[in-house]
Amino acid sequence: MLKKTAVVLSTLLLSNSLSAHTLWLLPSHYVLSKQDSWISVDASAANMTFVPDKGISLASLKLHLPDGKVQQVTSVHQGKRKSMADIQLAGDGTYKLEMANPLRFFTSYELNGERKRLMANKQERATQLPAGASKVETTQMRSRNFAYITVNSPTNTLVKLQGEGLEISSKVHPADVVAEEPLHLVFNLDGKPQAGVKGVLSYEGELYRNDAGRIEFETGADGAFSFTPATAGRYLIEASYSADSDSALADKVRESVTYTFEVALP
């Protein structure tokens, strides 16, 4: 069970399931004490937290090194229920595993009573929309799935805000999250705390619980969501933000993040 201490939100709901599959990355280890250690990573698109359902392509899986450099992960296998990767972490510091979709634009419209779509921004769509198209709307989209792994000494290069898209920040380093201690998270859009970010917090083992123990939240003006994990284990946060946009490229913006992390024993 999760013990909530402070949640800045407009609604708080318990939920047993989500309407769509969630893509998550699950490292075998989040904290290591030996250089050159290997970890395995499971990845799946699934309805239940950390219960694999559909294997996914790992072509975009990248490893961010503690110094900020990025390398492609090449030792991968895509299975029917889950995909897997093997990764060796050479030196000390905090690494970041990430699968991210680049910024993209999706235009939907109606033609002869049918809803259709094309990949184009507002400027590009003018030459691509068929005659008679109506109810035209362009959405700017971006998504990130990530997890941090620390070898020996935690470092901060990769956990600092980059100021682009939807990001999560905290005064507690990912390697230092402990059960029975409050965790305060801030959801930022383009480097600033963002109200209206909707998310779900869940944790491993829900297959064996009558109550999945999920918490749905929506951030207030400070962009914050706080909770106290009652038990150690592996947790999942999936969050998204959607709003109208007055940019030259899109009518709406939609950002999403999926973050897995470990809570250590007190």
Image (cartoon, rainbow, N blue to C red):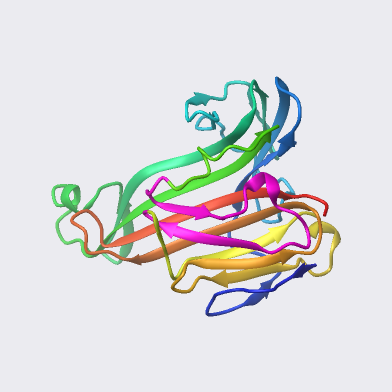
Q: Is residue 101 above or below residue 62?
A: below
Q: Which of 182 and 220 is in front in this view?
A: 182
Q: Could you tell me which residue is drawn at 51 percent across and 54 percent down?
A: 168
Q: Can residue 108 be seen in this snapshot?
A: yes
In the displayed structure, would residue 154 be above or below residue 24?
above
Q: Residue at x 45, y 48 (%)?
A: 161
Q: How many marks overall? A: 0
* Displayed quadrant of residue 115: bottom left
Q: Magenta stretch containing residue 184, yes or no?
A: yes
**Quadrant of the image for the C terminus?**
bottom right
- Magenta residues span 162-190
Q: Quadrant of the N terminus?
A: bottom right
Residue at 81% from the left image edge and 59% from the top image edge: 231
Task: Give the image quarter of residue 109.
Answer: bottom left
Q: In this view, does 251 lie to the left or right of 30?
A: left
Q: Which residue lies furthest to the bottom in this view?
A: 10
Residue 232, position as x, y percentages in the image: 80, 54
Using the image as rendered, state which of residue 223 and residue 165 is in the foreground.
223
On the rendered structure, is 55 left or right of 106? Answer: right
Q: Is residue 253 left or right of residue 134?
A: right
**Toward the viewer: 166 or 204?**
166
| Percent of width and height locating residue 10 | 52, 80
Residue 105, horizontal then vertical, whole percent: 31, 49
**Compared to 75, does 46 lie above or below?**
below
Q: Reply yes or no: does residue 163 show up in magenta.
A: yes
Image coordinates for residue 72, horizontal then vertical, percent: 52, 24
Q: Name the residue: 24% across, 50% down.
A: 121
Whether residue 45 is visible, yes or no, is no
